[in-house]
Image: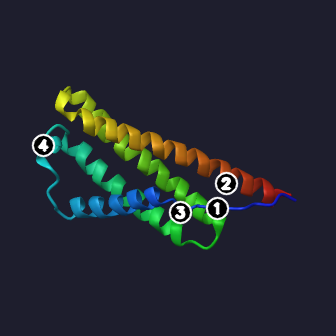
Amino acid sequence: MATIVVTGRHRPHEVMFLILSALAGGAFVVGAKPPTTVEQLAAPWVLWTWYLLLLASGVIGLVSITMPDTYRALVLESAAMVGQTAAPLLYGLALLASGVPAAGFAIAFCLSWAGASVWRGWQVWRAVRVLQQAGAQ
């Protein structure tokens, strides 16, 4: 039987992004004004999708941290990483499509964030597979 050792599940930068996502998404959904310099480059539907994905994925990810069951926590974290990938990817691509060179840093930041979330999602997926295989034996 395989021995499973879960270490460092709660990486500080990941927790920070989940908290930031939940707070920023929630603030924007209830009416806080985002920075106007970049906001003007995206269509309203992009902004609302961005806000809601940030809020949902941030909350789901934070809930996953509180779960005592490793398997359920990883499944929730995987769901959160889908939103943490989709939100910055959508926003970054919308900014890229605007063709404004001044948005370069925001584009790079969003695409890097999406890439990091894909990487973490892949790690979580692998961990879930190991737990599933261990449970099947």
Q: Residue at label 3? A: 10
Q: Are marks 2 and 1 in contact (CB under 8 Å)?
A: no
* 49 versus 17 height, above or below: above
Using the rendered view, name the quadrant where residue 33 is placed.
bottom left
Q: Are marks 1 and 3 in contact (CB under 8 Å)?
A: no
Label 3 neighbourhood size at 10 Å, few (<14), some (14-19), many (20+)? few
Residue 82 point in image, percent of width and height: 47, 48
Q: Are marks 2 and 3 in contact (CB under 8 Å)?
A: no
Label 2 neighbourhood size at 10 Å, few (<14), some (14-19), many (20+)? some
The local secondary structure at tag 4 comes to helix
In the picture, the disc for residue 128 is: 2
Label 1 neighbourhood size at 10 Å, few (<14), some (14-19), many (20+)? few
**Lower position in the chain sequence, tag 4 or tag 3:** 3
Q: Residue at label 4? A: 37
Q: Nearer the viewer, mark 2 or mark 1?
A: 1
Residue 45 point in image, percent of width and height: 23, 44
Residue 90 point in image, percent of width and height: 34, 39
The local secondary structure at tag 2 comes to helix
| Label 4, label 1: how far apart the Cα atoms are | 41 Å
Q: Residue at label 1? A: 7
Kindly identify the amino acid type of the residue bearing the numbered disc 3.
Answer: His
**Lower position in the chain sequence, tag 2 or tag 1:** 1
**Lower position in the chain sequence, tag 4 or tag 1:** 1
Kindly identify the amino acid type of the residue bearing the numbered disc 1.
Answer: Thr
* 70 versus 89 height, above or below: below
Q: Nearer the viewer, mark 4 or mark 2?
A: 4
